[in-house]
Amino acid sequence: MPARTPLDAGAILAATEDILRRHGPDKATVIDVARALGVSHAAVYKHFASKQALREAVTRRWLDRNRDTLAVVAADRAVPPARRLRAWLHAVLAVKQAKIREDPELFAAYGILAAAHSAVATDHVADLLAQLTAIIADGVEDGSFRTGDPRATARAVFHATAKYNHLAHAAEWQDPGIGAELDEVCSLLLEGLRAPASP
Amino acid sequence: MPARTPLDAGAILAATEDILRRHGPDKATVIDVARALGVSHAAVYKHFASKQALREAVTRRWLDRNRDTLAVVAADRAVPPARRLRAWLHAVLAVKQAKIREDPELFAAYGILAAAHSAVATDHVADLLAQLTAIIADGVEDGSFRTGDPRATARAVFHATAKYNHLAHAAEWQDPGIGAELDEVCSLLLEGLRAPASP
């Protein structure tokens, strides 16, 4: 927990992000961050015990920045599950497209960090999978989807939309047809999820 | 067309691949290839008008190396379309896994070339999509699949399996669970393609 002092963890992470944006991941070290903030290394180490811990924290903060936007879409029970699933998959793509557009250098720097700190990326994916599982479970509950294992099905849907959620495809997310393409994939996946109409 | 001389296009491409394997894409130039073969630049230029043409040709040859293996799977009408679609998607992954395993340096070098010469990669994908379209059209014909547009559906299936066919995911293809994961995605996609049982 950040102490109630002028130098809290948030200020350190903001300074780290500023360094990442301007100088790339190599410079995101405790020493460089302390220098940028005009404080001692010890002051930064008090909050982040190592370069590794600092990098993981800043990467986690970035990956989870739009977590709540997506959680709201996932939990909106006013929208039927099939429509909600499609909206959520589009929202995942949209928040990532926005991140690139707003700050391409920072996006590239975080892409390198996310690949290097795979445990952080794994946690991020687990969180997204939990949101997706909840939508699918709602669909099973109201009879619109058919699956015995919403978690396994969520995993299959997530993998089947890797082109629209995995950083490795970031270069393709600015293609003008990418949204329409995702929509075609959604339609096919929703056909696969749909429960047969009652006789 | 290669002339019937000791130096044909095939010998040039083989020498280029050998340079790629040992020195990476930067050295795959007409000058380096001519030196390796002990011939003049002009002799190489007779077959490949530019560095660009040489690199495109060697990349195309590599991407299409297992084309016929996959074409045989796609065209095997003795296998019902649903089973054939699954087998083909697994075969696409398997040929790429084998390429990495057999020669990881060469795989990395070609990955860089394929990204740089996107028109070659686009032709390769178009060829794979034609194979996939044929499987889906066979399924529509025998009543096992339902789609009004086999080509659009093939595109959706291909995009939904990007994690198992796109070079950007090469690092994940050696994961021990990757085949089982693809199988889950296949099952979901096949559910989406399946025509409803006749009443």
Image (tube, coloured by chain):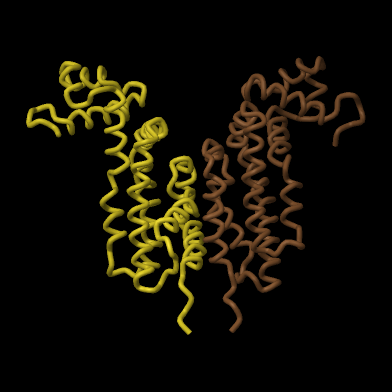
Chain colours: A yellow, B brown
Q: Is residue A82 rendered to the left or right of residue B137?
A: left
- Which corner quadrant holds the N terminus of chain B? top right
Q: Residue at x 79, y 24 (%)?
A: B44
Q: Is residue A167 visible?
A: yes
Q: Measured along the vertical axis of the image, is residue B82 above or below residue A16?
A: below
Q: Residue at x 30, y 29 (%)?
A: A55
Residue B152: x and y in percent read 59, 62
Q: Measured along the vertical axis of the image, is residue A16 above or below residue A140?
A: above
Q: Residue at x 66, y 20 (%)?
A: B22
In the image shown, does A171 or B185 lie closer to the viewer? Answer: B185
Residue B98: x and y in percent read 66, 37
Q: Residue furthest left?
A: A4
In the image shown, does A60 or B10 lie closer to the viewer? Answer: A60
Q: Is residue A122 rendered to the left or right of residue B154?
A: left
Q: Residue furthest front?
A: A148
Q: Is residue A105 visible?
A: no
Q: Measured along the vertical axis of the image, is residue B189 above or below residue B197?
A: above
Query: Residue B86 sits in which quadrant?
Result: bottom right
Query: Residue A134 sits in which quadrant?
Result: bottom left
Residue A81: x and y in percent read 36, 67
- Which corner quadrant holds the C terminus of chain B? bottom right
In the image shown, does A87 or A115 lie closer to the viewer? Answer: A115
Q: Residue furthest right?
A: B4
Q: Residue at x 67, y 46 (%)?
A: B123
Residue A2: x and y in percent read 13, 32
